[in-house]
């Protein structure tokens, strides 16, 4: 679920709705910042319990020479800026096609498909690989750099989990406990597959993890993010919600409000990755948030807190959305009800120092960034239903009650 996740790959997880329908109820909820929600056990909890009061120290304990593979996409620029601010010496390797406004950074140009010449004969303390969309890229870079760096940090994805034996969606399951930790089964190649064949997104990530571990035994860190959100995310998979809720009115909210959900602000993710690199922290880590179980309702209410627009949430059942042809993740973004990937174990990451800013801050900053986007981008979003389609679905839902 990293920013590079292709939309086609996301659709492979939609099929579960075709055989399962979960009844929901329409209700209106509109709490404000500081309000508390009643949990299913009768207890109350803040809308967003993970607001951190202290930011990490800005000066690195162990300044290092870092090579960032990528650096001009979604998560790259903040990763690089954080590293520079913390006193690290940073080089980035890109194709040179995107404008890189990154002062105090060495910019190396090449192509991970076939031109790594700019990296030859060089050494770094640590490599941060955050843009591998093809496992063969990782084969090439690790082969070249395994003796040129002490540490390899690979940014993977929780989409690496899967295959036969992996936990699947269970009807009506709101997942009170995580089903997946870092030792869960990952994708493996199908029968007849040979090295060099094409691989789908989840398999690419799993293969890349294996390659990194093999090339840097005992010297590899694998970070598996969930849905990465925040300012700069052009996929609109989370951006849809701050924008839609800020517009106000009746908002279609999907399925059971208690379904588990997880997201992570790209700034929290990248700041933590830099700290893992500077501290030489090895191992495999799931990386999403927040630090306690979050329901879909809590996520929407956390977003609601940043706007004064009158908002009414109408919860529409999964079964009805299915009948309307509205798909999770694409038509209804940041929502995959009952999927184990929406609630994975994060204990290892917390122990390794992963922290979070408030969801309200993420929503506010995302909304403000979205207002700066070109009109064409805002009119042709990559995820989310149109307002007309939403009105049609809501009208049909009310008529069916």
Image (spheres, rainbow, N blue to C red):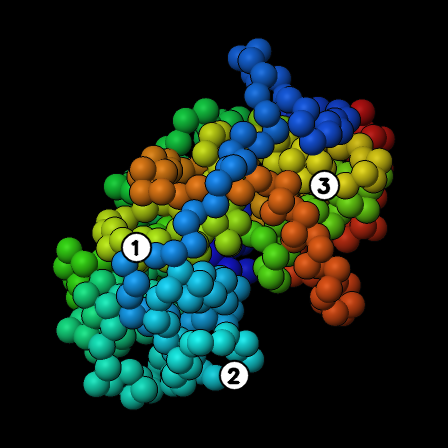
Which callout, 2 or 3, points to the residue nearer the camera? 3
Q: Residue at x 59, y 25 (%)?
A: 46
In the structure shown, which secondary structural element does the residue marked by tag 1 occupy?
Answer: loop
Q: State the image coordinates of residue 185 (x, y, percent, origin top left).
A: 28, 44
Q: Which residue is mark 3?
A: 306
Which callout, 2 or 1, points to the residue nearer the camera? 1
Count of marks overlaid on the render = 3
Q: Residue at x 38, y 56 (%)?
A: 59
In the structure shown, which secondary structural element does the residue marked by tag 2 occupy?
Answer: loop
Locate the C terminus by quadrant. Answer: top right
For residue 70, above or below residue 159: below
Front-most of residues 35 and 235: 35
In the structure shown, which secondary structural element does the residue marked by tag 3 occupy?
Answer: loop
Query: In the figure, is residue 8 to the left or right of 396?
Result: left
Q: CA distance from mark 1 to mark 3?
A: 36 Å
- Is residue 15 at all visible to an observer of this figure? no
Report crowding for label 1: few under 14, some 14 to 19, many 20 or more residues within 10 A (C-alpha). few
Report crowding for label 3: few under 14, some 14 to 19, many 20 or more residues within 10 A (C-alpha). many
Q: Which mark is residue 97?
A: 2
Q: State the image coordinates of residue 79 (x, y, percent, origin top left).
A: 44, 62
């Amino acid at each position: 679920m990293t920013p590079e996740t292709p939309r086609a790959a996301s659709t492979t997880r939609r099929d579960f709705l075709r055989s399962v329908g979960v009844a929901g109820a329409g209700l209106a909820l509109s709490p404000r910042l500081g309000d508390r929600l009643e949990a299913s056990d009768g207890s109350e909890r803040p809308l967003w319990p993970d607001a951190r009061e202290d930011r990490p120290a800005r000066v690195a304990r162990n300044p290092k020479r870092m090579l960032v593979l990528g650096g001009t996409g979604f998560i790259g620029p903040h990763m690089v800026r954080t590293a520079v601010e913390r006193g690290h010496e940073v080089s980035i390797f890109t194709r040179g096609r995107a404008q890189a406004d990154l002062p105090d950074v060495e910019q190396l140009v090449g192509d991970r498909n076939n031109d790594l010449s700019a990296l030859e004969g060089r050494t770094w303390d640590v490599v941060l690989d955050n843009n591998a969309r093809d496992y063969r890229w990782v084969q090439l870079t690790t082969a070249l750099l395994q003796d040129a760096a002490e540490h390899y940090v690979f940014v993977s994805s929780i989409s690496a989990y899967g295959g036969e034996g992996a936990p699947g969606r269970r009807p009506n399951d709101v997942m009170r406990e995580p089903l997946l930790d870092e030792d869960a089964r990952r994708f493996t190649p199908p029968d007849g597959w040979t090295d060099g064949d094409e691989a789908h997104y989840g398999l690419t990530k799993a293969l890349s993890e294996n390659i990194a571990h093999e090339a840097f035994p005992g010297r590899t860190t694998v970070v598996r993010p969930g849905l990465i959100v925040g300012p700069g995310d052009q996929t609109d998979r989370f951006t849809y919600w701050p924008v839609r809720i800020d517009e106000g009115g009746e908002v279609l909210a999907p399925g059971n409000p208690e379904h588990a959900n997880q997201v992570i602000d790209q700034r929290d993710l990248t700041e933590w990755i830099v700290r893992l690199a500077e501290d030489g922290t090895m191992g495999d880590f799931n990386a999403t948030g927040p630090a306690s179980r979050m329901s879909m309702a809590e996520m929407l209410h956390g977003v609601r807190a940043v706007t004064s627009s009158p908002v009414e949430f109408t919860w529409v059942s999964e079964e009805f959305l299915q009948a309307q042809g509205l798909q999770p993740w694409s038509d209804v973004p940041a929502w995959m009800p009952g999927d184990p990937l929406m609630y994975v174990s994060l204990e290892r990451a917390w122990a390794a120092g992963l922290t979070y800013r408030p969801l309200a801050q993420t929503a506010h900053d995302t909304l403000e960034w979205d207002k700066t986007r070109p009109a064409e981008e805002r009119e042709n979003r990559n995820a989310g239903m149109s307002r007309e389609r939403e009105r049609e679905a809501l009208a049909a839902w009310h008529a069916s009650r």
